[in-house]
Image (cartoon, rainbow, N blue to C red):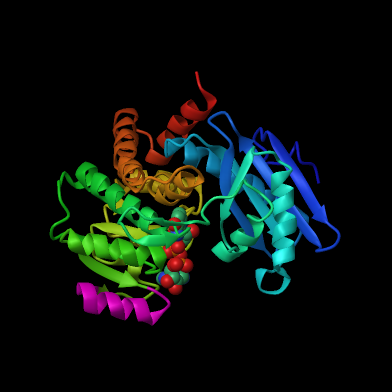
């Protein structure tokens, strides 16, 4: 396996392989770009089928963090770490401390946080041996609630703000009163987003594989319930994917009814062709890594002296960033995700 020739390598500054014979730790830390500051990105633990799969994942995710952090206006570059292993079977405090020592050896060019397979509790074990971890302390979130690490309220607020911006552009409407938003996935972000939208006067259509939050949203917000395989085609103004990646694919795209796609999920477009096809059909797409950056803004702020008002301000600024993306896309005739990538590259590559 060649690293430098890897299709996802894309000029990474460094890729380190970490091993601890006592705990069996096998991990990779990738730092894509530190021009704007130390690489910030979560630690993922996953039972990868092969080392090659883990390398591909960490490179792709680390590069993605460079773009996301740049667009969020953070003084952070992009980095990511993965542990090869099953979090349900191979995780232990000793393993996390071994990972912490590996991170500490990077001397601050990579700062870690939570991702799939890793909890705040795991990060606390890791923090015993490294300074370079964020999202572990109790703090007050952007809505005033006490949180330990959980960035979901900030993510939901950012998506809500982004939806308002998209509605202004695509529907020439200043408010959400009476508009319908279809939400796929009522988890930590989706449910909070539903609450914001309801408060702003929007009607909701919701769907989840778990019936509990769906029933709760019906009772609390008067939400209409759609089946899991039909939510994308709901008669709505906005479709908000807040569950899994690739929500916009060959099957769902031709059936979309909404004029706007704007949600929290990562990697919403199955491929670049799906972005171009949305654009061709006149459906406005809010690039996922721009609209869902509230979480990383929150976690990045926990790295320093946490200031809830400042975090709220920065999360709300996601609306302005999207506004810039949509305006540039309108004048250049390109899809918004192409424009977003270019703006991010201008920021982290410099003149
Ligand atoms: P979560 O796991 O709390 O919620 C996901 C919800 O989607 C769950 O309720 C699950 O039952 C539901 N779901 C799964 N498959 C579904 C399907 N096929 N149809 C309908 N519902 C389905 O996750 P979350 O923290 O709310 O994050 C949601 C998405 O946003 C994820 O893609 C995540 O990567 C992304 N994201 C989250 C954050 C954050 O701060 N939590 C930040 C950035 C991006």
Query: Which of the pair 45/150 is nearer the observer?
Result: 150
Q: Is residue 171 left or right of residue 265?
A: left
Query: Which of the pair 305/159 is nearer the observer?
Result: 305
What residue appears at the point 57 percent right and 47 percent down from the top-left corner?
A: 41
What residue appears at the point 15 percent right and 50 percent down from the top-left corner?
A: 175
Q: Residue reaching furthest top? A: 351
Mark yes or no: residue 53 visible.
Answer: no
What percent of the width, then of the height, locates residue 125?
65, 61
Q: Is residue 69 left or right of residue 24?
A: left
- Residue 85 found in image quarter: bottom right
Which residues are drawn in magenta? 208-223
What percent of the width, then of the height, locates residue 4?
75, 36
Q: Is residue 160 above or below residue 272?
A: below
Q: Is residue 343 left or right of residue 105?
A: left
What percent of the width, then of the height, locates residue 133?
59, 50
What residue appears at the point 50 percent right and 54 percent down from the top-left corner?
A: 270
Q: Is residue 218 above or below residue 292?
A: below
Query: Which of the pair 33/308 is nearer the observer?
Result: 308
């Amino acid at each position: 396996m060649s690293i430098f020739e890897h299709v996802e390598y894309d000029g990474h500054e460094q890729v380190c392989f970490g091993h601890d014979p006592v705990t069996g730790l096998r991990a990779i830390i990738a730092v894509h770009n530190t021009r704007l500051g130390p690489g910030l990105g979560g630690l993922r633990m996953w039972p990868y089928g092969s080392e090659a799969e883990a390398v591909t994942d960490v490179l792709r995710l680390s590069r993605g963090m460079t773009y996301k952090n740049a667009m969020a206006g953070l003084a952070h570059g992009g980095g990511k770490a993965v542990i090869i292993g099953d979090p349900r079977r191979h995780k232990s405090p000793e393993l996390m401390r071994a990972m912490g020592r590996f991170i500490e050896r990077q001397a601050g060019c990579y700062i870690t946080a939570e991702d799939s397979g890793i909890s705040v509790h795991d990060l606390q074990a890791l923090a015993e041996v490294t300074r370079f971890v964020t999202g572990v302390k109790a703090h007050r979130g952007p809505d005033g609630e006490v949180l330990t690490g959980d960035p979901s309220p900030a993510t939901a607020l950012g998506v809500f703000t982004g939806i308002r911006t998209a509605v202004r552009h695509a529907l020439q409407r200043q408010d959400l009163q009476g508009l319908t938003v279809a939400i796929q996935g009522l988890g930590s972000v989706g449910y909070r987003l539903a609450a914001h939208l309801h408060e702003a006067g929007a009607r909701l259509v919701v769907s989840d594989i778990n019936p509990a939050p769906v029933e709760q949203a019906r009772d609390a917000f008067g939400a209409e319930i759609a089946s899991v395989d039909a939510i994308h085609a709901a008669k709505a103004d906005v479709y908000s994917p807040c569950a899994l990646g690739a929500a916009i694919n060959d099957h769902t795209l031709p059936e979309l009814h909404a004029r706007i796609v704007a949600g929290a999920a990562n990697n919403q477009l199955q491929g670049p062709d799906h972005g171009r096809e949305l654009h061709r059909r006149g459906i406005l797409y809010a690039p996922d890594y721009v609209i869902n950056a509230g979480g990383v803004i929150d976690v990045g702020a926990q790295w320093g002296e946490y200031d809830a008002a400042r975090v709220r301000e920065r999360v709300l600024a996601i609306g302005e960033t999207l506004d810039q993306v949509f305006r540039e896309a309108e004048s250049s005739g390109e899809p918004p995700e192409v424009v977003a990538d270019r703006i991010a590259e201008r920021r982290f590559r410099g003149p």
